[in-house]
Image (cartoon, rainbow, N blue to C red):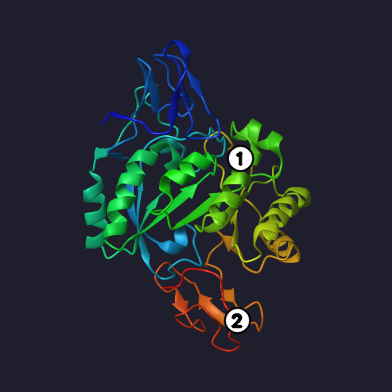
Amino acid sequence: MIKEAILWERREGNAVQCTLCSHRCDIPDGRFGSCGVRKNSGGRLLTYAYGKVIADHIDPIEKKPLYHFLPGTYSYSIASAGCNFRCSFCQNWSISQLSAREGDIEGYEMKPSEIVREALANRCRSISYTYTEPTVFIEYARDTAILAREKGLANIFVTNGYMTREAVDAVLGVLDAANVDIKFGKDEDYKELCGGRLDPVLDTVRYMVEKGIWVEVTTLIVPGKNDNTRDLRYIASFIAEIDRNIPWHVTRFHPDHKMTDAGITPSDSIMSALDIGRKAGLRYVYPGNIGAYGTTVCPECGTVLVTRGTDKDTVAEGLVEKGSCHKCGMTISGIWK
């Protein structure tokens, strides 16, 4: 379904400027923006990313990953094709790098109401807009999220964070949580490996937290790229300056897409990143893609609060329903109920 996009402005000569993501593309008539799914047609910006699902799954919330948001529940996860980044190491490149510009948009039609119905039928507590980049299908995600909220479902973005404040504002009131990738600690790496910049991503994290969206951060540890102490300290310190209670997930890289020459991230690199995060003052730092999910412990007394093993056995052991340690009473940041 081709639909008029939101978040754009008219320019001279039938040109438009897209204000959805931080590329802020100036798009001449008849051309696509950098995402490949938004096109200027006669001075109107159209989205080709509405109404078609390229992937849908029922996932444990921990796979987003979100550890402090409705643990032990399931999330109905959907994606539309496309992305505003061109990451050479993308793990989902076969669907994220499709574009209407190249005529290879794929998927099957699902109305927002059908997505919500599927989520409810499968006893999910939330809908996650994930796998590709939800920013580029924001119209589809927002329409779905409004209906989901009416039915008591939470809404989650798993995002690269390269969205404008206008885009965040467009989903305020229906977006409950986000996992934001901070991929590198240097702008030049973002430019070389993703086709973007670092500062807009950092601004998205700040702004989402300011607006009351629950945020967790993920960094994929790529050998030889961001596994150095400088990058990891920068990212960890940035998160800690905003809020020491923001969970940081450091995950293992597997060679994929255009970066098949780099090896799998050694376990030692993951452990080193966890240590850097803790030394920066972060209270909740978790490993990813190395086996069992991480365990949440009380930062005050060390009591085990939540254990995560396999996909189906997340257990809140020492965490009372209101979100505090049952032993010392410390409030544990998150959305627990």
Observer-nearest residue: 245 or 277?
Answer: 245
Q: Do the residues labelled 2 and 1 touch (CB within 8 Å)?
A: no
- Vertical position of residue 79 compared to residue 16: above or below: below
Q: What residue is at 58 percent from the left and 89 percent from the top? A: 327
Q: Is residue 155 left or right of residue 286?
A: left
Picture quarter containing residue 298? bottom right
> How many residues crowd mark 2 within 10 Å: few (<14), some (14–19), many (20+)?
some
Of the image marks 2 and 1, the number of the one nearer the N terminus: 1
Question: Which numbered circle lies on residue 330?
Answer: 2
Question: Which numbered circle lies on residue 200?
Answer: 1
Q: Which amino acid does label 2 sit on?
A: Met
Q: What residue is at 54 percent from the left and 44 percent from the top? A: 161
Which SS class for mark 1?
helix
Give the Cα separation between the discs numbered 2 and 1: 34 Å
Task: Give x and y (percent) for residue 251.
Answer: 59, 55
Picture quarter containing residue 193? top right
Which SS class for mark 2?
loop
Task: Give x and y (percent) for residue 16.
Answer: 45, 20
> How many residues crowd mark 1 within 10 Å: few (<14), some (14–19), many (20+)?
some
Q: Is residue 130 visible?
A: no
Q: What residue is at 69 percent from the left and 42 percent from the top? A: 225
Observer-nearest residue: 260 or 120?
Answer: 120
**Quadrant of image for the N terminus:** top left
**Quadrant of image for the C terminus:** bottom left
Q: Is residue 29 visible?
A: yes
Observer-nearest residue: 210 or 138?
Answer: 210
